[in-house]
């Protein structure tokens, strides 16, 4: 059944909204009822794996032209970049003269249960890039962009594009950082006991950054007269947003303590494989794609790379929304093909 996880926390957010906006709260509950009554979507088949490192796969989207490796966040599945037949960034790019490959981090098992974010970069992502046998373009989304920034300085790549990527974590608002710090303090004992941070806890992190938006999308779903394909897209995106693997404890600790609390990337103190990772150390062409309306990764937290494309779509809408093709897909394709020809 599709719906927000954890449901009790979502209902608490609805109660908070009800104090100042009872109608939106009522609409959100009606939207939740409608979503939970939808029939299951047909599962889309996974693309074939080109190679594997640990339990991480590099999935092949075909096409001809330069290799472009897409690095999604460790949080939530990689399918946001291939969410439906009509809204697949990777599927479309494969018809546009490039050869997309998608990092699928896979289940957290075996040695990966003890890995930090930096470990995922040095022990999984960099070896995958090296095993390709030729340099590729690198595109990272959200936390995957932060990781791609490091990988681009540890392995030979042709270029780096960042999509909705946080770098200067200290530039989140004081209220957001305090809320995230409080969440980690609450979740940390359970994570220590399990050795993992469950997806439900990570979802609470995202909701704390945009609680009103979390409730409002369900309220809109109740009141909008959507065609069937848009309903299916909403359902697929909610399925993506409310699923995913847990984070290993070491990765969660690095995210909350080193990145969010201490901002070691933004402060120039993030060291991977003995090297300080910094936007100023990039030796390849780079593009920073940011959204002025993103509440999950506000534009002010971006890396500061001078070659910057600004959009006015949200954190997910910039990739999958009705304007994504014109605002993100086409400019990214044009930039990659321009580099390939020059």
Image (cartoon, rainbow, N blue to C red):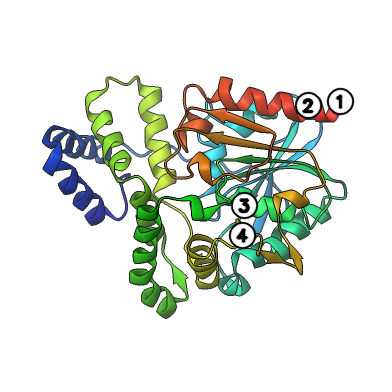
Q: Nearer the viewer, residue 338 or 101?
A: 338
* Residue 30: x %, y % from top left: 17, 35
Which corner quadrant of the image does residue 36 belong to? Answer: top left
**Which of pointers 3 and 1 lies earlier in the amino acid sequence?**
3
Dot 2 and dot 1 residues touching (CB under 8 Å): yes
Q: Which mark is residue 341?
A: 1
Please state if 294 lies on the left or on the right of 147 as rendered.
left
Q: Which residue is mark 3?
A: 146
Dot 3 and dot 4 residues touching (CB under 8 Å): no
Q: Is residue 304 visible?
A: yes
Which corner quadrant of the image does residue 304 belong to? Answer: top right
Q: Which residue is mark 2?
A: 337
**Which of pointers 4 and 2 lies earlier in the amino acid sequence?**
4
Q: Which residue is mark 4?
A: 267
| Residue located at (64% from left, 33% from top) | 308
Spatial CA distance of label 1 from label 4 is: 36 Å
Classify 10 Å Cα crowding around label 3: few (below 14), some (14-19), many (20 and above): many
User: Which of the two marks, 3 or 4, is nearer to us in this view?
Assistant: 4
Spatial CA distance of label 3 from label 4 is: 14 Å
């Amino acid at each position: 059944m599709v719906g927000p996880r954890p449901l009790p926390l979502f209902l608490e957010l609805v109660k908070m909204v009800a104090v100042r906006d009872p109608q939106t709260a009522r609409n959100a509950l009606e939207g939740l009822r409608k979503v939970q009554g939808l029939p299951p979507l047909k599962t889309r088949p996974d693309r074939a794996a080109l190679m594997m490192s640990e339990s991480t796969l590099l999935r092949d989207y075909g096409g001809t032209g330069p290799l472009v490796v897409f690095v999604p966040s460790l949080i939530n599945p990689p399918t946001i970049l291939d969410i439906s037949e009509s809204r697949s960034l990777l599927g479309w790019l494969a018809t546009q003269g490039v050869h997309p490959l998608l990092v699928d981090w896979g289940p957290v098992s075996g040695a990966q249960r003890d890995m930090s974010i930096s470990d995922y970069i040095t022990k999984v992502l960099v070896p995958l890039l090296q095993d390709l046998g030729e340099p590729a373009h690198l595109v990272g989304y959200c936390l995957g962009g932060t990781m791609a920034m490091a990988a681009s300085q540890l392995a030979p790549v042709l270029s780096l594009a960042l999509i909705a990527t946080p770098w200067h974590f200290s530039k989140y608002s004081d209220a957001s950082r305090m809320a995230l710090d409080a969440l980690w303090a609450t979740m940390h004992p359970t994570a220590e006991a399990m050795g993992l941070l469950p997806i439900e806890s990570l979802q609470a992190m995202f909701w704390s950054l945009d609680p009103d938006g979390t409730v409002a999308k369900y309220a809109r779903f109740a009141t909008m007269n959507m065609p069937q394909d848009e309903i299916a897209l909403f359902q697929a995106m909610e399925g993506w947003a409310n699923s995913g693997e847990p984070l290993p404890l070491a990765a969660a600790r690095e995210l909350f303590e080193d990145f969010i609390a201490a901002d070691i990337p933004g402060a120039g103190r993030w060291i991977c494989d003995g090297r300080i990772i910094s936007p100023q150390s990039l030796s390849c062409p780079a593009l920073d794609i940011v959204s002025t309306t993103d509440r999950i990764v506000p534009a002010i937290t971006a890396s500061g790379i001078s070659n910057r494309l600004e959009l006015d779509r949200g954190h997910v809408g910039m990739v999958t929304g009705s304007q994504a093709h014109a605002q993100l897909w086409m400019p990214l394709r044009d930039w990659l093909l321009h580099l390939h020809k020059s």
